Image (cartoon, rainbow, N blue to C red):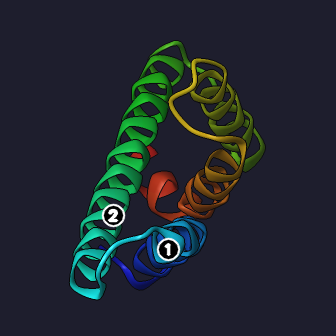
Amino acid sequence: MDNSIRSFFSGLVFGVAAGAVAGVLLAPKSGVETREDIKKFAVEMGEKATAEYNNIKAEVQKRLVVLKAAGEKIDLDMYKKLVNEVIDEFKSDGSVTADVAKRLGTQLSGDWDMVKTSLV
Protein backbone atom coordinates (compact mmCIF):
# COMPACT_ATOMS: atom_id res chain seq x y z
CA MET A 1 0.00 0.00 0.00
CA ASP A 2 1.56 3.31 -1.00
CA ASN A 3 2.03 6.25 1.39
CA SER A 4 -0.90 8.33 0.13
CA ILE A 5 -3.32 5.45 0.69
CA ARG A 6 -1.80 4.72 4.09
CA SER A 7 -2.09 8.42 5.01
CA PHE A 8 -5.69 8.50 3.84
CA PHE A 9 -6.67 5.51 5.96
CA SER A 10 -4.78 6.88 8.94
CA GLY A 11 -6.70 10.15 8.67
CA LEU A 12 -10.00 8.38 8.14
CA VAL A 13 -9.51 6.11 11.13
CA PHE A 14 -8.28 9.00 13.26
CA GLY A 15 -11.32 11.14 12.43
CA VAL A 16 -13.83 8.41 13.15
CA ALA A 17 -11.94 7.26 16.22
CA ALA A 18 -11.71 10.74 17.73
CA GLY A 19 -15.48 10.98 18.07
CA ALA A 20 -15.83 7.46 19.37
CA VAL A 21 -13.00 7.85 21.84
CA ALA A 22 -14.76 10.81 23.41
CA GLY A 23 -17.82 8.64 23.95
CA VAL A 24 -15.80 5.73 25.28
CA LEU A 25 -13.87 7.95 27.68
CA LEU A 26 -17.10 9.28 29.13
CA ALA A 27 -18.48 5.78 29.72
CA PRO A 28 -18.45 4.53 33.32
CA LYS A 29 -15.74 1.86 32.92
CA SER A 30 -12.33 1.21 34.39
CA GLY A 31 -9.23 2.53 32.64
CA VAL A 32 -8.21 -0.96 31.49
CA GLU A 33 -11.66 -1.66 30.00
CA THR A 34 -11.71 1.75 28.32
CA ARG A 35 -8.26 1.25 26.74
CA GLU A 36 -9.28 -2.18 25.45
CA ASP A 37 -12.47 -0.73 23.97
CA ILE A 38 -10.46 1.99 22.21
CA LYS A 39 -7.96 -0.51 20.77
CA LYS A 40 -10.75 -2.79 19.54
CA PHE A 41 -12.63 0.10 17.97
CA ALA A 42 -9.53 1.43 16.17
CA VAL A 43 -8.79 -1.98 14.64
CA GLU A 44 -12.40 -2.47 13.55
CA MET A 45 -12.61 0.97 11.94
CA GLY A 46 -9.32 0.50 10.11
CA GLU A 47 -10.50 -2.83 8.74
CA LYS A 48 -13.89 -1.39 7.73
CA ALA A 49 -12.31 1.61 5.96
CA THR A 50 -9.93 -0.66 4.06
CA ALA A 51 -12.74 -3.03 3.10
CA GLU A 52 -14.97 -0.22 1.83
CA TYR A 53 -12.11 1.30 -0.16
CA ASN A 54 -11.39 -2.09 -1.75
CA ASN A 55 -15.10 -2.69 -2.52
CA ILE A 56 -15.53 0.67 -4.18
CA LYS A 57 -12.25 0.38 -6.05
CA ALA A 58 -13.23 -3.06 -7.36
CA GLU A 59 -16.58 -1.72 -8.60
CA VAL A 60 -14.87 1.20 -10.35
CA GLN A 61 -12.39 -1.18 -12.00
CA LYS A 62 -15.19 -3.48 -13.13
CA ARG A 63 -16.98 -0.57 -14.79
CA LEU A 64 -13.76 0.66 -16.39
CA VAL A 65 -13.31 -2.74 -18.03
CA VAL A 66 -16.84 -2.56 -19.45
CA LEU A 67 -16.30 0.98 -20.77
CA LYS A 68 -12.95 0.06 -22.29
CA ALA A 69 -14.44 -3.02 -23.96
CA ALA A 70 -17.17 -0.78 -25.43
CA GLY A 71 -14.47 1.40 -26.98
CA GLU A 72 -15.02 4.39 -24.70
CA LYS A 73 -12.18 6.87 -24.29
CA ILE A 74 -11.40 6.95 -20.60
CA ASP A 75 -9.74 10.15 -19.46
CA LEU A 76 -9.42 11.81 -16.06
CA ASP A 77 -12.84 13.47 -16.29
CA MET A 78 -14.57 10.23 -17.23
CA TYR A 79 -12.73 8.41 -14.44
CA LYS A 80 -13.73 11.00 -11.82
CA LYS A 81 -17.34 10.87 -13.01
CA LEU A 82 -17.32 7.10 -12.70
CA VAL A 83 -15.79 7.26 -9.21
CA ASN A 84 -18.47 9.75 -8.13
CA GLU A 85 -21.26 7.53 -9.51
CA VAL A 86 -19.97 4.49 -7.62
CA ILE A 87 -19.42 6.50 -4.43
CA ASP A 88 -22.98 7.87 -4.67
CA GLU A 89 -24.35 4.34 -4.99
CA PHE A 90 -22.44 3.17 -1.92
CA LYS A 91 -23.63 6.27 -0.05
CA SER A 92 -27.26 5.79 -1.05
CA ASP A 93 -27.35 2.16 0.09
CA GLY A 94 -25.86 3.14 3.46
CA SER A 95 -22.55 1.31 3.02
CA VAL A 96 -20.62 4.49 3.82
CA THR A 97 -21.39 7.83 5.43
CA ALA A 98 -21.20 11.06 3.48
CA ASP A 99 -17.89 12.00 5.15
CA VAL A 100 -16.31 8.61 4.48
CA ALA A 101 -17.64 8.67 0.91
CA LYS A 102 -16.04 12.07 0.34
CA ARG A 103 -12.67 10.82 1.63
CA LEU A 104 -12.86 7.63 -0.39
CA GLY A 105 -13.80 9.60 -3.51
CA THR A 106 -10.82 11.89 -3.02
CA GLN A 107 -8.50 8.93 -2.58
CA LEU A 108 -9.85 7.07 -5.60
CA SER A 109 -9.68 10.17 -7.78
CA GLY A 110 -6.06 10.51 -6.73
CA ASP A 111 -5.41 6.99 -7.97
CA TRP A 112 -5.82 8.13 -11.59
CA ASP A 113 -2.13 7.78 -12.45
CA MET A 114 -2.15 4.12 -11.40
CA VAL A 115 -5.45 3.46 -13.17
CA LYS A 116 -4.33 5.22 -16.34
CA THR A 117 -1.36 2.89 -16.74
CA SER A 118 -3.57 -0.16 -16.38
CA LEU A 119 -5.85 1.05 -19.19
CA VAL A 120 -3.12 1.07 -21.83
Graded by Cα atoms within 10 Å as few (under 14), some (14 to 19) or many (20 or more), the crowding at tag 2 reads some
Residue drawn 57% across and 25% down?
94
Residue 56: where, in percent of width, then height?
46, 37
Dot 1: element: helix
The amino acid type, in three-letter code, at marker 2 is Phe
Residue drawn 60% across and 68% down?
19
Where does label 2 land, which residue? Answer: 41
**Among the two numbered marks 1 and 2 on one chain, the one whose residue lies closer to the N terminus:** 1
Graded by Cα atoms within 10 Å as few (under 14), some (14 to 19) or many (20 or more), the crowding at tag 1 reads some
- Determine whether, in the image, residue 32 is placed left or right of residue 91: left
Residue 34: where, in percent of width, then height?
32, 77
Front one among 19 and 102: 19
Viewer can see residue 96: yes
> Distance from label 1 to label 2 (Cα)?
9 Å
Residue 80: where, in percent of width, then height?
71, 44
- Determine whether, in the image, residue 21 is placed left or right of residue 103: left
Front one among 72 and 31: 31
Dot 2: element: helix
Residue 101: where, in percent of width, then height?
64, 45
- Determine whether, in the image, residue 69 is placed left or right of residue 11: left
Pick out the residue farthest to the front.
28
Q: How many marks can you see?
A: 2
Q: Identify whether 58 is placed above or below 18.
A: above
Q: Identify whether 32 is placed above or below 106.
A: below
Pick out the residue farthest to the top.
70
Marks 1,2: beta carbons within 8 A: yes
Where does label 1 land, which residue? Answer: 21
The amino acid type, in three-letter code, at marker 1 is Val
